[in-house]
Amino acid sequence: MKAISLDLGGSHVSLAVVEDTTILMSQEISVDAGGELLPLLPIFKTIVYDMLAELRIPVEDCIGVAMGCAAMVDRATGRVLSTNGKFEDSPGIDLPAWSREEFGLPFALENDARMALLGEWYAGAAKGSDDVVMITLGTGIGGAAMAGGKVYRTKQVQGGCLGGHIPALFTGRKCTCGGFGCMEAEASGWALPLIAREWPGFEKSRLATLDRIDFRALFQFAREGDPVAIGVRDRCLHVWACGTVGLIHAYGPELVVFGGGVMRSGDIILPYIRDYASKYSWIPSGPVRILPAALGNHAGLLGAIPSLTDVVSDANAIPA
Ligand SMILES: [Zn+2]
């Protein structure tokens, strides 16, 4: 099966033609994080048709167009319902109609964390496991869950995809979601500079010399013995570990997969979380496996086939 796959990030969009678990061709373009989606659609169309031409694949050989985006989406209607400062015009766009008009194909829209989970389940670290939680550690923290080989969903579109907003500290910092002390507000890329600057002794830390405090620098300085970096790092590890226990208790997965850019330091992060989760989770069935994602940035693109296989069987999404 072949499909067209689009992965909308905050600062870039990846476009690909995929066949089963293989990316036949892909292209990445930089976009304005706060910009609009509508002006990009003709660019997407051109890139997709150029790739199909180069691959000598007729568009009708594809089963559909799949799109992952960092938003709450209604999969049944293919509509974006709520964004968090990215592509604010997207709720007004009829993306299934765009897909029908420009490609003559069904359209599957999915939250980016769910799409990454589908990709890892179909072609990566979660292959062969049907009860899975995926957590992506990056600028924000994404979460998605799967039970019995089906993405966890409820009538409320956020069902299962707000793992990053599991409260980790009820006295904690205000989060972008409106809540307080979420895992994301206490240990994510956007929260990290706020956490570091409040840390006692911050002004003496090497972190204070940086224009932009990120996890790469945090882990590096901690490895080199900077006491503030060690303190902040260990606090973040603790937050992620507590959040993981929360997700294990909520969804009862056999496997938790960690992805996202922060996982460059997975050699520190995963042993800590495995140890914590094995000590502090109530799991009579035995330890939950905790693995790094295997597909990196390709996870979302490779979620296309499983996400479309669902939608193509849904009469509402098949073109008239
Ligand atoms: Zn939150």
Image (cartoon, rainbow, N blue to C red):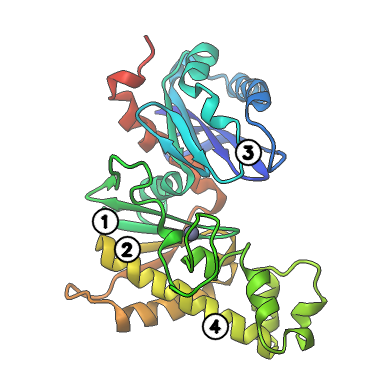
Q: Mark 2 or mark 3: which comes first in sequence?
A: 3
Q: Mark 1 or mark 4: which comes first in sequence?
A: 1
Q: Which residue is mark 1?
A: 131
Q: Is residue 253 visible?
A: no
Q: Which residue is mark 4?
A: 234
Mark 3 to mark 1: distance in Å? 29 Å
Q: Pointers 3 and 4 in contact (CB under 8 A)?
A: no
Q: Residues within 10 Å of mark 4 (few under 14, many from 20)?
A: some
Q: Pointers 2 and 3 in contact (CB under 8 A)?
A: no
Q: Residues within 10 Å of mark 3 (few under 14, many from 20)?
A: some
Residue 178 place in picture, x, y as percent: 50, 56
> Cβ(mark 1) to ligand 1 < 8 Å?
no
Q: Is residue 187 left or right of residue 255?
A: right
Question: The residue under label 3 is which amino acid type?
Answer: Val
Q: At 46% across and 21% down in the image, what residue appears?
A: 96
> Cβ(mark 3) to ligand 1 < 8 Å?
no
Question: The residue under label 4 is which amino acid type?
Answer: Asp
Where, quadrant-wise, is the N terminus in this rendering? top left
Location of residue 296 by image quarter: bottom right
Kindly state the secondary structure of the residue where label 3 is placed: strand
Q: Which residue is mark 3?
A: 13
Question: The residue under label 1 is which amino acid type?
Answer: Asp
Mark 2 to mark 3: distance in Å? 29 Å
Q: Which residue is mark 2?
A: 255
Mark nearer the viewer, 1 or 4: 4
Mark nearer the viewer, 4 or 2: 4
Mark nearer the viewer, 3 or 4: 4
Instruction: Classify 95 as above or below 157.
Output: above
